[in-house]
Structure formats: C-alpha cells, structure tokens
C-alpha cells in the first residue's frame, strides 16, 4: 500500500506536505476525528483526499456551495481520481448514474450538500449505511455554529452524523473559527477525540500595500498596465462605481467587466465565467463577488474603496494567490472613506451592534494609518503573534531613519498634560497647532502649550502622536471616545532625562514588482496552451495546471520526461496526459533561443529556505530546544539570537497551544500579569513592563498575551 507521501507525489505531483497536512492525515488514518483550521489556499482538501485514496471505502464530502463541488470534482478527475457530486444541477439520468457507481463501489469521493444528506426521511443516510463509508469530511465547518459569522441551519443536522455512523471518522475543515466556534464544532459533531490543528493565518505570498487614495486612478492604471497578463479583482463600494470603473478601464484597453448584485443573474454568471476561464482579466466588483470562487491564479486584489472591517479585508485579499505564488493586495485609503462608511455600518435601533461595527471600522482605519507592519497588524488583530518585520508590506519595504524627536515629544507630552489627560487625539492636535476652530475651549487658549507646535501640519502631528503611543510615551484610554494620557515613561522625557527617537520615512516605496527570473514569453505560451486544453475539456484553466506549475516550467525549463517529473503539479495522470505537449512547448522555445535545462537549480523544498519558511522553521527550532530542556538563555546563546527573539518564538507556541503558559511563567505571576494586560491592552509592551516591575520579564508578558489570545479572553 502506498504511503501518504507517495500518493502526494504520484497522484498530485507535489514534493512535500505543507503545514500540518501530514499529521492531520495520520490522525484520520488512525481512525480519529480531527478539526482543521487553515487559511484559504492552505491545502485543506488534501487532508481528506489523501486518506480517501488510502481507505477502502467511500469518503463523503459535505460542502455548502454547488459551484465549488464541480470544481473540486473536476480537479480530482484530471488527476485520475474517481469522484462525483450529487446536487440539483445534475439531470435525473446523471444522478442515477452516480447512484449506480456508488452501489458498485466505483467512487472514492462523493461531494454532497448537507440538506441532501438528510432529506426524505433520511433515505440517503440509509442508502449510505448500506455502502462502505470510510470517512466524512465537512467543509466550511464553521457553518454549524451560531458563533461563526456564517451560520447555516442545514448544517445543524450534521450533529446526528456520529449517531448514524459511530465508527466512521469525521474531519471538519474551516478557514475561520475563533475559540467559541471551534468548541462548538467539536461539541455539535460529537467528536470522539478533540484533535484540533490550527495553522497560522499568515498568507506569506500575499504582499500588502496601503497607499493614499488621492489621485489613485493613474497609479491604478499604471499597475494594471504592468500586469496585463495577470488576473485580478478590483473591489469598490457601490454598484455605480463598479459599472463606471469597469467602463473606464475598458475604454483604456483593459479587459475588465463589472460584477454586482444589481446585474441580472445571467450577466453575472457570464462575467464570472469569463473571469474564471481567464478570458476576462479584471473584475470590478462589489463585495457580492468572490464567494464560491476557487480560481487559484488571482494575482491581485485591489480595494479602491475601504472595506468595513479587517475581517472583510482579510477575506477579500485572501482570494488572491491560492496557488501560493506572489500576489498583491493593494488598498487605496482615504479618511473620507471612513466617514462615508460610518453611515453604512451604523445599524438603526441597535446601538450595541452599531458600537461593535464602528469599533471594527476604526480598527480598519488604524491598520491604514498606523506606522507599523501591515501583516503583523492583521495577524495581531486575529490574535496571532507575528514577527516585527515581514519584508513584504509597504511599511516593511520602506526605508526609515530614526530622527531625534525629543523636542517634538516634549511639546506633545506637555500639551497632553495641559489638557489634563482628558482629550482625544484630534483635539490635542488642533490644540498644539493653535487651531482657531470653535471646538477649542476658551479656557484652553491662554495656555502656554496652545499653538506650541504650529510649524507642523495636522498629518505630521497625528503621525508623531501615534508614534509616541507606539513607543509607550503616551497611551489611549477608553473604547468609544479614547483620550490621550501620559504614561510612566512620560515623566523622564518631560524632565529632560530621556531622548525620544521617532521614525521618519526616507524613501517611500509604492506597489512593487518582484524581480523575475523566469522566461516571460514562455510563460505566456504555456498559459495559452493551458487555455486551449481547458477549452477542449470544458474546465477552468487552473484545473489543468496551476500558475505555480507553469511558472516552474518557465523557470527550470525541463528537457525530458525525467526532468518533467520534478516539476510540482505533474502527478502520474497529468504526466501521461499533458506531459508530452508541455515538454514540446518548452523544448522548442529553448532550442530557438539556445537555452538549456535549469532543473538542477530546483532544490526540493525540504532543503530550501525562503524568507517566510525560515521564519516558521526558526521558531520550530527554538521550540524543539526548549522541549529538550534547555533554558531560554541557553537557546539564545547556542542559536546566536537574542533572548527577546527566543521569548517571542516560545510565546507563539503558547498561542498555538504547543506550549502551556505555565511552562514559561510561574503560576502565581499569571493573574497579576493578566490584570495589567487587561488594564493597559496588549498593543505596546513597554507600559506593561513598567507597570509590572522588574520581577516580570518581557518574555513572561509575551507568553501571557499569547495565552490570553488563544483563550480568546
Ligand atoms: P484550501 O481548501 O485550504 O483553500 P486547497 O485545498 O484548495 O486550499 O489548496 C490550495 C492549492 O494548494 C491547490 O492548488 C492545491 O493543489 C495546492 N496544494 C495543497 N497542498 C499542497 C502541497 N503539499 N504542495 C503543493 N501544493 C499543494
Ligand atoms: Zn510588514
């Protein structure tokens, strides 16, 4: 019998497992239940598809979206795996053909919607009970929970699955689930074992750029012009903007179509299909677009208008780069959009819900305005610990210099003190700049600090103050109307003991293009060949091969079958079916240009270190050392890293659950640290450290933060 790794290679043509795929597959093969949380594009499907091929019987996949069922089944079939789906889009004859196949035991995987599983007095359940069912896979498992953002009543019935099939393991998969939802899934499905696998939600191949919206149109056109061969989505807020922007772009010669809820359904699905088949490159859409789309080669997602919250932003940008190749998420930001959206997110007669939504909107605005790594801000928002510098967002790609900001800091702190720690950010800025606005209280005007910083603009001051908050010299208190207040660090600055260094952008990089070392023209030829084959077989191009596979071909230029096997994505069946024709395209391209094979440059992933992989690897090494009994100081010394770095690594594993918080922090300190975190928040560590004093280390604080986030407290 083949091992999971052999099947990965032979059937799917991939070299290595990703994330925890292998562990998950082993758990399922041992007959246990498992809950899998992995980001979009992470590779959830293989977690049940590989067991399905190893088990004797049938794997039943429960999935809510009809459009995705067909996609998945097509993708399996081109890899030579027998799979089918049952839903209302099939004719009566087609359905009975599937039933006969099931009775003959010819199918390895069956995709089905939950309502179908349980309809007609459970006829279908009884039917399945007569077959040999080896595994149930429940996709989008968060739909079973009221706590999730996408509850579906028909998922509730899945609770009886364990009773009907007590001996069949269940694997539940989702890309979003907080702690409550997670527990709910385990309970509702009555899992025998609470095996839960949580992967990081980081999407390393998506590069984040946030730019000012002013004059964005020319930059948008510029970007699209440089990416004419790529597919992407431009999100806008209104139907009108979707229509007008699509028209404008078409007039400029781009291949663009609108998509929004106001179009009739025939037109909508026509535009969607053109996009999926690479026949239209750009979709200008409202948020109505995206659900149920599996297209793996979306290279960019652009927000011309601000999303309402970070959840939406993450979900929409997450539609880029499912194939793992570099993709861009670009957002054009204006404070005006925030004001516009406030009306949209306020829900009449529901002040509680409105407050939550407004708070989420302001977090979205913070992400755009703050001077810090975009990726880290997003991951922190979802309760994940992340590296300080991701090297792939506009902030981390910029060059900064540290400038002496002591004088500026003193003015700011003095102003906050003069205002009695009782006024917000904007008021403070107006006050420092000596604004003539009526908003400024009369009794504030005679103060010495009023107008003390008129030499800088409003934007400058907002930047300075946020910088000072980040450095712990100021803090914001209160949720709804936060006020600025001094911290314990402030006094040292005011009395001249401490210098303050602020960050200043030296060279601002905008949306960038990574250097490419592949044969561009060949890549285009290969894409054309793929489109041609896809057309013949009536499937979307990305089902034949992902962009990642074509890119490898155009990079490593394989010259024969032996070399071709080394290209990721060529499993046995695809090799036999498409190997020759792709090989011919590559070899004739190379002959015409005197190019040779570069396959020796392809190093198996196991031995390769890319930036982001290095990040997770280095964390894992620290964990291994720690588990082997080494102290943090010893690990730091032997790895030539700082103690802080190692502490950060270990805190990450407290968050993922691989370490218990008690392994890093003594039990009696935990309540004290927790209380201080609750008081000050966890955005800046320095104020926490000051409040806790010398017997608590930064590492202990980080570990408790990781633990609190994991517990969702
Ligand atoms: P998800 O369901 O988590 O959004 P998919 O299962 O659709 O993600 O996988 C996304 C893409 O990654 C697919 O093209 C899949 O074939 C590919 N993939 C999955 N696992 C691996 C792996 N171990 N190596 C290479 N590619 C993989
Ligand atoms: Zn970054």
Image (cartoon, rainbow, N blue to C red):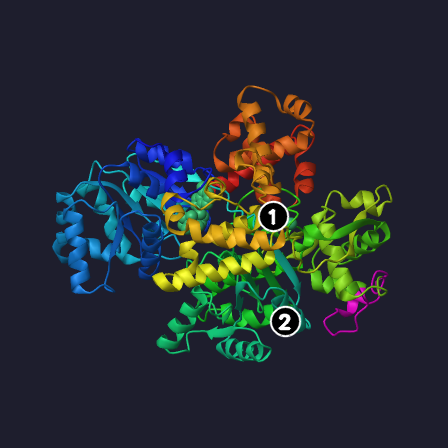
x and y, in percent, of residue 123 in the image: 12, 53
Q: Quadrant of residue 270?
A: bottom left
Identify the residue under disc 1: 376
x and y, in percent, of residue 207 in the image: 60, 54
Separation of disc 1 and disc 2 at Cα?
29 Å
Say whether mark 1 is within 8 Å of ligand 2: yes
For the residue labelled by badge 2, is the local secondary structure a helix, a strand or a loop? helix
Extreme residue in the top direction? 629
Is there any visible trace of residue 582 in the rendered image? Answer: yes
Locate the N terminus by quadrant.
top left
For the residue labelled by badge 1, is the local secondary structure a helix, a strand or a loop? helix
Mark nearest the camera among 1 and 2 is 2
Q: Is residue 134 left or right of residue 141?
A: left
- The residue segment tinted magenta is 433-452
Residue in view at x 51 percent, y 51 percent: 548
Q: Quadrant of residue 466?
A: bottom right
Q: Is residue 469 left or right of residue 166?
A: right
Is there any visible trace of residue 291 in the rendered image? Answer: no
Q: Is residue 592 left or right of residue 543?
A: right
Identify the residue under disc 2: 221
x and y, in percent, of residue 655 in the image: 51, 37
Q: Main secondary structure of the magenta part?
A: loop
């Amino acid at each position: 019998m083949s091992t999971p790794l052999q099947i990965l290679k032979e059937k799917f043509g991939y070299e290595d497992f990703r994330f925890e795929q292998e562990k998950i597959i082993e758990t399922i093969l041992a007959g246990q239940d498992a809950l899998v949380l992995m980001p979009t594009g992470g590779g959830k499907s293989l977690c049940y598809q590989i067991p399905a091929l190893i088990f004797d019987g049938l794997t039943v996949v429960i999935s809510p979206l009809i459009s995705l069922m067909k996609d998945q089944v097509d993708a399996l079939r081109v890899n030579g795996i027998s799979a089918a789906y049952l839903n209302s889009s099939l004719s009566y004859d087609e359905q009975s053909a599937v039933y006969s196949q099931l009775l003959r035991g010819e199918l390895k995987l069956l995709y089905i919607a939950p309502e179908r599983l349980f309809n007609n007095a459970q006829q279908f359940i009884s039917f399945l009970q007569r077959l040999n069912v080896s595994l149930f896979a429940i996709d989008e498992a968060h739909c079973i929970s009221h706590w999730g953002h996408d509850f579906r009543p028909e998922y509730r019935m899945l609770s009886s699955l364990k009773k009907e099939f007590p001996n069949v393991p269940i694997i539940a998969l989702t890309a979003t689930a907080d702690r409550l939802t997670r527990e709910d899934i385990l309970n509702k499905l009555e899992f025998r074992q609470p095996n839960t696998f949580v992967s990081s939600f980081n999407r390393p191949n998506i590069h984040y750029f946030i730019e000012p919206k002013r004059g964005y149109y020319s930059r948008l056109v510029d970007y699209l012009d440089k990416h004419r061969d790529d597919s992407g989505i431009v999100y806008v807020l209104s139907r009108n903007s979707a229509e007008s922007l699509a028209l404008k772009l078409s007039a400029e010669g781009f291949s663009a179509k609108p998509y929004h809820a106001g179009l009739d359904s025939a037109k909508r699905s026509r535009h969607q299909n053109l996009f999926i088949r690479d026949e239209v490159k750009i979709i200008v859409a409202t948020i109505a677009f995206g659900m149920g789309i599996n297209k793996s080669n979306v290279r960019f997602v652009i927000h011309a208008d601000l999303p309402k919250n970070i959840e939406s932003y993450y979900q929409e940008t997450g539609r880029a780069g499912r194939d793992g190749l570099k993709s861009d998420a670009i957002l054009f930001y204006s404070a005006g959009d925030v004001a516009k959206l406030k009306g949209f997110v306020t829900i009449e007669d529901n002040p509680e819900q409105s407050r939550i939504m407004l708070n989420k909107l302001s977090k979205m605005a913070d992400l755009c305005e703050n001077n810090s790594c975009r990726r880290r801000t997003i991951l922190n928002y979802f309760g994940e610990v992340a590296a300080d510098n991701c090297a792939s967002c506009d902030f981390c790609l910029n060059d900064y210099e540290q400038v002496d900001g002591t004088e500026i800091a003193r003015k700011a702190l003095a102003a906050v003190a003069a205002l009695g720690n009782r006024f917000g950010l904007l008021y403070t800025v107006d006050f420092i700049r000596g604004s003539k606005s009526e908003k400024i209280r009369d009794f504030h005007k005679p103060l010495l600090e009023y107008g003390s910083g008129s030499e800088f603009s409003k934007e400058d001051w907002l930047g300075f103050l946020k910088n000072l908050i980040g450095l712990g010299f100021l803090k914001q208190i209160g949720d709804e109307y936060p006020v600025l207040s001094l911290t314990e660090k402030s006094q040292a600055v005011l009395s001249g003991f401490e210098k303050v260094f602020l960050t200043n952008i030296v060279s601002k990089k905008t949306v960038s293009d990574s250097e490419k070392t592949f044969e561009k023209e060949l890549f285009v030829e290969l894409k054309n060949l793929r489109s041609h084959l896809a057309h013949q077989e009536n499937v979307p191009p990305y089902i034949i091969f992902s962009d990642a596979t074509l890119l490898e071909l155009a990079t490593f230029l394989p010259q024969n079958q032996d070399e071709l096997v080394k290209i990721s994505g060529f499993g046995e069946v695809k090799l036999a079916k498409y190997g020759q024709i792709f090989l011919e395209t590559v070899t004739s391209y190379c002959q015409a240009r005197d190019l040779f094979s570069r396959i020796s440059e392809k190093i198996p992933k196991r031995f390769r270190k890319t930036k982001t992989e290095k990040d997770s690897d280095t964390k894992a090494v620290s964990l291994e050392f720690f588990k082997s009994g080494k102290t943090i100081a010893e690990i730091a010394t032997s790895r030539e890293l700082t103690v802080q770095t190692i502490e950060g690594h270990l805190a990450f594993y407290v968050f993922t659950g691989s370490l218990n918080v008690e392994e890093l922090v003594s039990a009696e300190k935990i309540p004290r640290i927790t209380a201080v975190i609750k008081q000050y928040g966890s955005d800046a560590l320095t104020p926490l450290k000051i409040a806790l004093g010398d017997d608590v280390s930064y590492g202990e604080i980080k570990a408790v933060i990781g633990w609190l986030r994991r517990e969702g407290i």
